[in-house]
Amino acid sequence: MSDRPDSPSRRTLRPEGAAGVTQSVREVLALDAVRAGLPEVVAGRDGLDAPVRWVHASDNPDVPRLLAGGELVLTTGSAWPESDDALTLLAERFAAVGVAGIVLELGTRFERVPDAVARVADARGVPVVALHREVRFVAVTEAVHARIIAAQTRALAARDEVRERFTALALRGAPTDHVVRQASQTLGCGVVLENLAHEVVVAAFADIAEEETLAGWMERSRLGADGMLIVPVEARGSRWGRLVALPGPDHPAGRRSVLEQAAIALAIGRLAEGGTAEWDRMGSARLLDTLLEGRFAHASAVTARLEAAGFPVRGRVLVGLALRGGADTSAIAAALPPGARVLASVRDDVAAVLASLPEGARVDDDAARRLGAVAGSHGTVAVGHDAYDVDAALASVREAVALAAGAGTGVRRAEARPLARLIGELSGDHRLLAHGERMLAPLLAHDLRRGGDLLDVLEAMLAHPGNRTAAAAASHLSRSVFYQRLDVIEDVLGLDLDDGETQTALHLAVLSRRR
């Protein structure tokens, strides 16, 4: 094998699109075509996992100038220089161009790998492999290239599948969190959508510790730490945020390709829905809903998630709010003390809000009046108790929602409504739910059958227990009609509405249903 000329007609070229489809030097050495030459790793063992993008067979000492990096060079060394200095320079040139490794067949020119080449290879981490038997270089080339081309074909098919998947999601108008979750499942790793301030909008995790991942997120994201793969979410010259994939396994389509397709689907969604303001509202609502529904394991994990979303928890005053009649998140935040941050979720015309206030601040009467202006003259503002940890803060939101759900307008404070506060603290308790169902089931069935308003009338009466004129006004009924409704309620429930214990039990039932 002493005559292997390196002419243009014999030169191995890398096919278009093969970049990124690789196998390691270690894997190449395990091929039968290579093992037939009794390969021995002589130097640069630390580089055996380097990727091989292509194979180039040449004895020409000037071949480094023809390479682009990642090639495995096959050679007999027949035209290599003789002096140690020249061999050192040749080895340095191979290393500088970034070859994956050098396979030197012994017996034609060298009986062993020259020490000068081995020294450079060890220093630069370039594997040098000696073949002790003659092999057909074309067989090695064909074996390696066949694997690369097969992998490339699989990659192209995988890219097509990924593109079709995320295009379908975009065309169906899939929600942002679903797109992010699909990206996480496809890549088998955590994926985070963040806004331009590096605040987490949506996060999906695959078998990793959420708390550890999100701790100090904004700082780590700015630094691009922990092997993060990052692509922008942008369209029409506007950038809205970034999609970040955490370290994970390789994907046949390429991890970046998957993330880019997900980012395109998200960008299409943003064009349809109106940009980052919609993201902020959506992320706020989804995060608060997740917390209120109890879909978390540890309070510390919730703290990490909240702070990664730009919502400070530690060293802050946390207050639950509920507004019926006004749900403008930015207006709610503006009505609170300077430095306040809010999460809001709107259901059935009631905005559930978790507010984070600077230490020492509170929702005083002035702030409550400003919130009342947001809710409107016919709206209701409910203020929960001050809290200093996540669990207490969620109880504060629940009690505020329970307060706002009752009849009447104006500002209500949990500290002045102990029963509503109790309901908030017991929210979700099966005994409380059973009590509400047991007390109100006949009334609910009556209203459903006849399209009636007896439950609303009962709520108005309980909200004004000592003033039925005010209760009738709150129900928008005349006093005579209101009293007729009360008589029907007593008949349906079989209870005396003037009895104090009965009123308390019914009030508890109504509040538990509206929690």
Image (cartoon, rainbow, N blue to C red):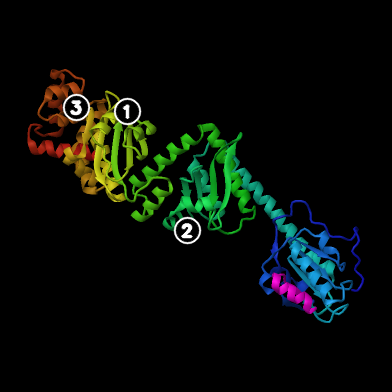
**Eyeballing the image, is 215 above or below 281?**
below
- Which three-letter amino acid code belongs to the residue tagged 2? Asp
- Which three-letter amino acid code belongs to the residue tagged 1? Val
Magenta extent = 114-129
Q: Which of the two marks, 2 or 3, is nearer to us in this view?
A: 2
Residue at 16 percent across and 41 percent down: it is 418
Q: CA distance from mark 1 to mark 2?
A: 42 Å
Residue at 21 percent across and 43 percent down: it is 423
- Residue 317 in picture, x, y percent from top left: 29, 45
Q: Is residue 515 visible?
A: no
Locate residue 224 relative to residue 486 in the image: left or right.
right
Q: Residue furthest front?
A: 85
Per the image, the residue denoted by label 2 is: 207
- Residue 391 in picture, x, y percent from top left: 29, 50
Write down the quadrant of residue 404 in the picture: top left
- In this view, the residue in front, 85 or 50, is 85
Which of pointers 1 and 3 lies earlier in the amino acid sequence?
Answer: 1
Q: Quadrant of the N terminus?
A: bottom right
Q: Main secondary structure of the magenta part?
A: helix
Per the image, the residue denoted by label 3 is: 457
